[in-house]
Amino acid sequence: MSTVLPPPAAQLNPWRPMGPCTPAACIGDPASAVGRVRRTGRVLAVAAVVLGGVPVALAARLFTRAHVTRLWARLMLRALGLRLEVRGAIEADGAGALVVANHVSWLDPLVIAATVPSRPLAKREVAGWPVVRTLVAGAGALFIDRERLMALPSAVAAVADALSAGDTVVAFPEGTTWCGRGMGGFRPAVFQAAIDAGAVVRPATLRYREGPLPSTRACFVGDDSLLASLLRVTATRDLVVEVTLLAPVRPAPGAGGPRARAELARISEARVRAGVPGPHLRGEGV
């Protein structure tokens, strides 16, 4: 497996950051690849789960949405040949929680959905994708428009409303993906929602492995395509994703404003970063 480290980090702007990772620099050959027959079977299974997910997503709007989505996400991970390992748990006390994690792959929202009943915070572009838009709508996704900074307050308010209603919301505050051998800084904007709702923040660390060894095969970085990433995942043997749910971070009573959310982001990031190997670069921005 390649041990090349990613190049120095780059930024497009504070709102649309660009991670330093690229497929050429970060993704090596698998420690062990599956055969062509199994690979084809996985791809066909993924297609079946995606198509079957459309009526499930429509039905999920009428039933217990988060739990239906959790079952579907677990089925999708199994179809991909990805094994899920979870450490820790979120208390089932009926209160909302903001789950924040490092961002490695397009798989990450599926992984968190399979771990805990939750609603993802997704970029607005996803709402225009055929089939996918039905799936994410069924999961109760909250959308954020990263092209319009003026839309940020309304997105934060929507997250706060969901948290106040008792929903668990998932966000990836880096705003971009890394290959898993490092991570960027957490942007503090979404943490305002936890402050406004009086909700706890649950940091989580995602690590992908091939058996016991760290792996970048699942990452989705740089100019990588979704199809290339999908085929890479289905071709890899013994691919595991490890989710560690860390101790909750509670907003200080009466806290508010930029300083409070920046501190909440700093503490959460530090806890996640402790479980992620490699170089770490703090980011600035909203």
Image (cartoon, helix red, strand yellow):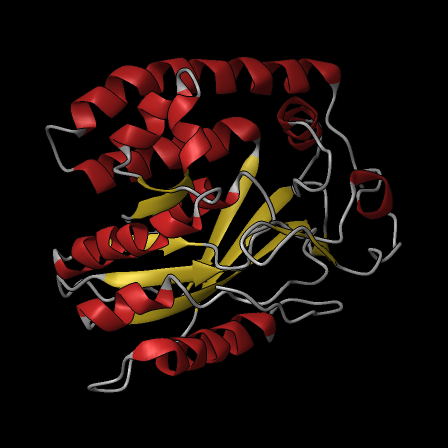
**Where on the picture, by quarter, is residue 22?**
top right
Q: Residue at x 72, y 40 (%)?
A: 222
Residue 163 horizontal/vertical position (percent)? 20, 59
The relative height of residue 158 versus residue 262 in the rendered view (above or below) is: above
Is 61 positioned to the left or the right of 78 in the image?
left
- Point out the residue furthest to the front here: 150
Q: Residue at x 59, y 67 (%)?
A: 185
Is 44 positioned to the left or the right of 23 in the image?
left
The relative height of residue 265 versus residue 37 in the rendered view (above or below) is: below
Is 221 positioned to the left or the right of 26 in the image?
left
**Where on the picture, by quarter, is residue 245?**
bottom left
Foreground residue among 53 and 187: 187
Residue 29 in view, yes or no: yes
Q: Residue at x 27, y 48 (%)?
A: 117
Is 126 positioned to the left or the right of 68 in the image?
right
Residue 100 horizontal/vertical position (percent)? 42, 61
Q: Residue at x 51, y 76 (%)?
A: 271
Residue 20 horizontal/vertical position (percent)? 75, 53
**Where on the picture, by quarter, is residue 90?**
bottom left
Residue 199 in view, yes or no: no
Foreground residue among 229 and 196: 196
Q: How many marks?
A: 0
Foreground residue among 194 and 91: 194
The relative height of residue 74 versus residue 97 in the rendered view (above or below) is: above
